[in-house]
Amino acid sequence: EVTNCDLAVIGAELIDVKGMYVVPGGVEIHVHGGGGRDFMECTEDAFRAAVHTHMKHGTTSIFPTLSSSTVPMIQQAAETCTKLMEEKNSPILGLHLEGHYLNMKMAGGQIPENIKNPDPNEYIPIVEQYHCIKRWMLLRTPGAMQFGKYIAAKGILPSVAHTQAEFEDIRTAYEAGYTHATHFYNAMPGFHKRREYKYEGTVESVYLTDGMTIELIADGIHLPSTILKLAYKLKGVEHTCLVTDALSCAATEGKEINDPRYIIEDGVCKLADRSSLAG
């Protein structure tokens, strides 16, 4: 019971939260690391340390996320993930791959040398061997629709992001199994013009696609409160989830980061050249 009064139950424990909020445990479906450790390290020690960091802050189950990686890195991370998922009451529910099949123009903080077009000779053996993979993200690259149909049939969630897709692209993608939009609004355009004509962006296209779900980085910096309210109004609770997209520098208790790609400024992680937020 949540109450302002003493509980009328003999032996009940009363917890005074002192005006704070009580919320369900977080199911984190997009997170790259934390506490100084990155899931791209692919080791059991790194996985445990990053997961433990997030569990201290209210996460109860988690999908470790890799940025664009090489095939050997994906294989090693999948081996580690599979092992840890088999442990009793494991908080790890599956592996999320953000890349490496992306639109280079919209790569953002992804590692450019790892980005390529989807290759069935590469991804089919990975999916067939490692059943821990639960999310995989791409769009608007040659072979993307074939890829989406294949992984959706295998129970993996195809997701769109890092894209310049417009409505026809999104509609075709949705029919191919891309039913989710990664870090909505980030690394995707909205309404725009080409010369004198106006076009819907990825954002409007996702809003117009009934049934498509979205995830938001609701830290108040990646998206302003007005946009968060708009997403809530148009997509609603049942089609929206919140993610951290946290990097290894999250929850490091003020320790300096030594990755030259990033800076911490205004309470958020940015690319060092300030061209984009990084996570």
Image (cartoon, rainbow, N blue to C red):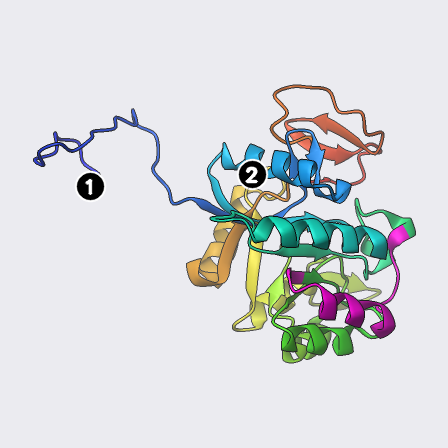
Left or right of 247, for residue 73: right
* First to last magenta residue range: 114-135
Q: Is 107 placed left or right of 15 in the picture?
A: right
In space, the residues marked 1 and 2 are separated at their CA atoms by 29 Å
Indicate the position of residue 198 as horizontal and vertical percent values: 74, 67
Q: Which amino acid does label 2 sit on?
A: Asp
Toward the viewer: 272 or 8? Answer: 8
Residue 71 screen position, x and y as percent: 84, 57
Examine the rendered structure and indicate whether residue 135 appears above or below residue 221: below
Q: Which amino acid does label 1 sit on?
A: Glu
Quadrant location of the C terminus in the rendered image:
top right
Query: Measuring 50% from the left and 58% from the top, which residue is drawn there?
Result: 240
Give yes or no for residue 117 being in the magenta stretch.
yes
* Picture coordinates of residue 33, whole percent (x, y): 66, 39
- Picture quadrant of residue 37: top right
Return the residue at label 1.
1
**Whether residue 248 can be seen here:** no
Viewer-closest of 178 and 163: 178
Residue 166 location in percent, x, y? 72, 69
**Residue at horizontal 69 percent and vertical 79 percent from the top:** 172
* Residue on which the image places disc 2: 219
Residue 127 falls left or right of residue 250: right
Tell me: residue 146, above or below residue 139. below
Residue 245 - label: none
